């Protein structure tokens, strides 16, 4: 039996692991919930098996539960890797059963399929690890049962899968709920055989070069080129199976999650001209949010839940006052007071009512639709940068649009979004305002006064 957790951890570190596999190890060790979306043959199941054994050795009271959508996936995939690791381990382990391993009383790992999810409620320990393999197909009820388990003890969750379904709890971990998850993405081009290559350079490789795969059990160059020719760069399966991204969430999703992941880039895009957007929230759960961008790149995004956030907004904006071109403020309702206050303090404020008529009424039903569509186009071509706030990314990913009978773009109303369980996208609104190209002839609009 393995007695020394430190010695076993050192043994793990000697394994030939990819950078992404090491990142998953660190994340599970440090964070309560980790979600990994990955390309085909990325090595994610192998590292999950390593983590199962590490957790059992690390804690004398450890319980590990693994699950997958089908019994076949539980038995052959993850537990196949666990059994191989045990048989090849330089440290002694008890003989594993098909989907279980017991190190002692109250110290074991077990594999269940999702149709046995109700049994999850019977597991409780001071230290637990729950592994959701092929997580996009795991039933929502499993996630609900896990939340009940997480109410007590040190419970860690690892959810892994190919991002083929743009809905459900696994998808939510990367969008609406990503602030409470540590999220990791693995593209084929992050794996050893394709590191340093691009789809374009892959097309030029010779047959010999395509066959040169130092790590042949991971995604190979030949397979990726085959799928490139079969699917093309715009195919949803290319996004999910090769790039490790969710495909465009749905026909009604405004901004692709792929574009939002790209927008996390914090390099370049500055031009010394600063623009700001302010979305003013009311009392309660709504936030007042300030977004400041330098050229194409966001350099500040802050949110407050205060009855009167004006002083906080002024204090942050003061750092950029000499360089600010405009401060766009949603002036509807209580936003009018923020507009007046910024104007009194000498800021180049513009009061914007996004419900008003668009400058291109044949295309957009109102200004909100025009400005959000403009943000979508920026994101698509890579002119939205520095977007690193997880909650903002989640809100932007959840915005939906449609076209009315006149062919105009319509952004889903907050009331309709709330019916879907989506709260007010205050941070997304501030980003939209910061990037809005307001077509007024005056540098500063006339601030509306109370009648």
Image: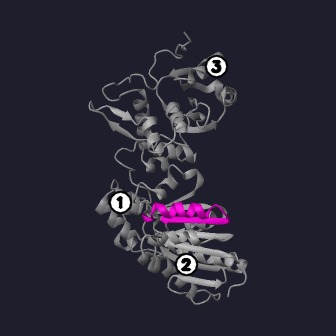
Q: Which residue bears the numbered disc 2?
A: 110
Cα separation between marks 3 and 1:
50 Å
Q: Which residue bears the numbered disc 3?
A: 341
Q: Is residue 73 left or right of residue 230?
A: right
| Mark earlier in primary sequence (1, 2) | 2
Residue sticking out furthest to the top: 451
| Mark earlier in primary sequence (3, 1) | 1
Q: Residue at x 55, y 52 (%)?
A: 178
Q: In this view, does 114 lie to the left or right of 203?
A: right
Q: Residue at x 54, y 9 (%)?
A: 451
Magenta segment: does it hold 153?
yes
401 lies above or below 170: above
From the image, state whether disc 3 or disc 2 is nearer to you.
2
**Few, some or many C-alpha atoms within 10 Å of disc 3 (few <14, some 14-19, many ≥20)?**
some
Q: Which of 157 and 143 is in front in this view?
A: 143
Q: Which residue bears the numbered disc 1?
A: 237
Secondary structure under the numbered disc 1 in the rendered image:
helix
Query: Which region of the structure is painted magenta?
Result: 137-160
């Amino acid at each position: 039996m393995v007695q020394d957790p430190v010695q076993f951890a050192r043994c793990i570190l000697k394994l030939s692991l990819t950078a992404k596999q090491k990142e998953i190890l660190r994340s599970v060790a440090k964070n309560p919930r980790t979600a990994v979306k990955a390309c085909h043959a990325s090595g994610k199941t192998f590292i999950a098996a390593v983590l199962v054994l590490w957790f059992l050795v690390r804690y004398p009271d450890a319980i590990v539960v693994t699950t997958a959508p089908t019994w076949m996936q539980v038995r052959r995939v993850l537990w196949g890797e666990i059994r191989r690791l045990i048989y090849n381990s330089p440290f002694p382990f008890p003989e594993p059963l098909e989907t279980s391993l017991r190190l002692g009383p109250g110290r074991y790992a077990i594999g269940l399929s999702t149709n046995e999810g109700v049994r999850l409620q019977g597991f409780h320990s001071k230290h637990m690890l729950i592994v959701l393999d092929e997580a996009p197909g795991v039933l929502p009820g499993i996630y609900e049962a896990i939340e009940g388990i997480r109410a007590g003890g040190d419970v860690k969750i690892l959810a892994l899968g190919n991002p083929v379904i743009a809905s459900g709890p696994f998808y939510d971990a990367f969008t609406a709920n990503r602030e409470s998850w540590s999220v990791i993405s693995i593209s084929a081009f992050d794996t050893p055989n394709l590191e340093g290559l691009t789809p374009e350079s892959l097309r030029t490789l010779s047959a010999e070069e395509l066959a040169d795969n130092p790590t042949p059990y991971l995604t190979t160059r030949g397979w990726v080129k085959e799928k490139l020719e079969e699917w093309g760069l715009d195919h949803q399966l290319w996004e999910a199976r090769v790039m490790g991204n969710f495909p465009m969430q749905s026909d009604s999703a405004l901004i692709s999650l792929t574009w939002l992941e790209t927008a996390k880039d914090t390099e370049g895009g500055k031009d010394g001209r600063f623009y700001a957007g302010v979305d003013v929230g009311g009392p309660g759960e709504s936030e007042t949010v300030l977004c400041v961008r330098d050229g194409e790149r966001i350099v500040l995004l802050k949110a407050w839940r205060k009855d009167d956030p004006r002083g906080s907004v002024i204090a942050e904006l003061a750092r950029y006052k000499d360089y600010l071109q405009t401060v766009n403020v949603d002036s509807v309702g209580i936003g009018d007071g923020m507009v007046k206050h910024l104007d009194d303090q000498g800021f180049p404020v513009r009061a914007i009512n996004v419900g008003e008529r668009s400058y291109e009424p044949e295309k957009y039903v109102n200004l909100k639709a025009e400005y959000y569509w403009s943000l979508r186009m920026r994101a698509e071509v890579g002119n939205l940068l520095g977007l690193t706030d997880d909650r903002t990314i989640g809100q932007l990913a959840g915005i939906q649009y449609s076209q009315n009978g006149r062919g105009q773009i319509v952004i889903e109303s907050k009331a309709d979004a709330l019916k879907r369980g989506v709260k007010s996208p205050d941070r997304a609104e501030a980003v939209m305002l910061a990037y809005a190209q307001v077509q007024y002839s005056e540098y500063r609009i006339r601030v509306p006064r109370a009648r």
